[in-house]
Amino acid sequence: MKIVVLVKEVPDSYGQRKLNLTTGLADRAASDPVLDEITARAVEAAVSHAESAEGVEVALLTMGPESAEATLRKALAMGADSAHLVTDEQLAGSDLSLTAEVLAAAIKKIGFDLVIAGDLSSDGAAGVLPAMVAEHLGVAHATSLESVTITEAEVTGDRPSYGGTVSLKAELPAVISVSERLPDPRFPGFKGIMSAKKKPLERYSLADLGIDAGADVPRSIMLSVSETPARTAGEKVVDEGEAGKQLAEYLIGKKLV
Amino acid sequence: MSAGDRPVKPGRRIGLGGTPVPRAAGEAEPKAEPEKSEPRRRGLGTPTPTPAEAKAETEQQGPPVEPVPAPTPAPAPATKQPAAQEATNYFGRSAKRWGLVAAVGVVGVVALAAAIVLGTQWFLGTSAGSDFLDRYPGQYSQPDAPDGYPWWLNWAHFFNAFLMALIIKTGIQIRGEARPQAYWTPKWNKKRKISLTIWLHQALDLLWVLNGVIFVVLLFATGYWTRVVPTSWEVFPNALSAGLQYASLDWPTNHDWAHYNSMQELAYFTTIFIAAPLAIATGVRMSGLWPADNQTLNRIFPTGLARAVHFPVMIYFVVFILVHIFLVFATGALRNLNLIYTGQDATNWTGFWLFAASLLVIIGGILATRALIVAPIASLFGRVGR
């Protein structure tokens, strides 16, 4: 059984993240690159299943810059078997549709019984990529699972829903996305880090996957990007007998009442 | 995918508000009308126009402007440098003012120290002073106290020093840690989650408490307690006497093999029987050992109080350790080191080398307090994750 986990290197949300205001692309130099936590949980789910079952192979897949190798190695240290990196200059600034197309092509190339992805990246925060990949692959998709049980033939899990929890089951092959409710990722030990250095890491370019990034198909484009305006100081009302009136005037002036 | 750190393919992406992305030298200026071969995904500011729209838009916008350079902080002109320097404030004062404050402080401290030394020397020279010294020589007689340093005391002292160093290091680390590298969840309580640093701090605490309990039990079982617990009210005037002698730089003679001077005795008593229990009580209050659901106990001993006391107790320990080590070296280092490391009243280098070795062990221990090394140990008692 082969599990492909979609992982992603993201700018560390712990500090301030920046967009390049000229190109609209993430300024990767502005913050530390880290493995997105939700994808680390996805790796944890795959690896802990691989530990408890026979013949399970865990492959990591990411699309990113050349520098994403370091992050892939860190994820490999958690216990995955191999890593796959799609990297191509033409992919800079790809939209969701191109990303999904590329990832699906790579998944097909790797081969899969189950694809596990995080439900929402901390940088793009689109939350639709797993569904798009499932569409490309033409397999079932269970979204935002907060618990996952994998067997030889199927995957089951719980998904929070309005006013309750929905239990889902999908026959393999399938794509699932997992939520923050999954167990914390493990802390790789010394042994894991050492063995990660020797694990296979394969690179793919767009040509390897047979995808034309410039194809004349609809793509989403960024129309404008601007810096978040600095927070401005609020208005202070000091009570000198007129505060009530001032407050009312303020609210009326802001069209809040 | 997004990547700001690599060149963007020219023509595919147009910068903000129609500002073209810098294109490679020698490449043609963009044409107003998009070529058929150009991808439709164009990027910022260009919503896939029809040729006619594109033309109208380009006319409105005028010719493409020069690319906006990435905003970099403009270096201040050289002439403005002094002003900028003077404006640099460190905690409300300029560097120059701080220098002045420091100089005044140093002079003040030296003057105060000199005044204390000369003052006590003068006082002890008077008849009242020498009478006081005669009456209270700095220690009261303790004929029943056992002398020497038994082996268990030597070992307990070393373990204590080792654990203390690591506990202080990890404690300070906890305070400054914005984001721990790893977390630990106990096997017996899946809901609890503490940082690996806190786990290490508390694990060391438990070992330290165990060592301390064994030490105190042995102190009382062997009668050595009388060396560190005052048994007479005379300890106070004698401690004052010892203090005056230290201050006058004419230090009290060292009889550590038999008994400590009263100031030492009080300091050791405070450390063992006041500071350590305080550190333990406040530490337990903040740890998982505390019965957090017991509202009465919580009200009697609020966390805020524990936090407020735990840190100053650490400061006390650090000051004690510094003064302790200073005095060990200033009052016959080789003999003192033999007392505490070999348990023998001898002046040779054995104690010193054992001290040096123990220092290496302590430094090694401090260097080992990193997540990669601690995680496998912590995972024996719970789950280590991120």
Image (tube, coloured by chain):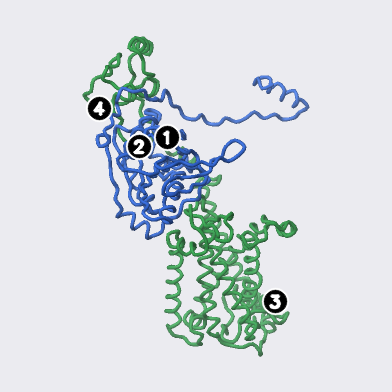
Chain colours: A blue, B green
Give the percent coordinates (x, y) of residue A182.
Answer: 51, 47
How far is the residue under mark 4 from the one under mark 2? 30 Å
Where is the N terminus of chain B found, in terms of image quarters?
top left
Question: Furthest-bottom residue in view?
Answer: B143
Q: Which mark is residue A103?
A: 2
Residue located beneath label 1 in the image: A129
**Front in this rendered view, residue A40 or B8:** A40
**Front in this rendered view, residue B20 or A104:** A104
Considering only vertical position in the picture, is A28 above or below A48? above
- Same-subunit check for callouts 3 and 2: no
Specify the subunit that label 4 lies on: B
How far is the residue under mark 4 from the one under mark 1? 33 Å
Q: Are marks 4 and 3 in contact (CB under 8 Å)?
A: no
Instruction: Identify the amino acid type marked 2.
Output: Leu
Mark 3, Cα crowd under 10 Å, few <14 / some 14-19 / many 20+, is some
How far is the residue under mark 3 from the one under mark 2? 79 Å
Q: What element carries label 2?
A: helix
How far is the residue under mark 1 from the one under mark 3? 76 Å
- Same-subunit check for callouts 4 and 2: no
Considering only vertical position in the picture, is B248 above or below A150? below
Residue located beneath label 3 in the image: B236
Residue located beneath label 4 in the image: B24
Which callout, 4 or 3, points to the residue nearer the camera?
4
Specify the subunit that label 2 lies on: A
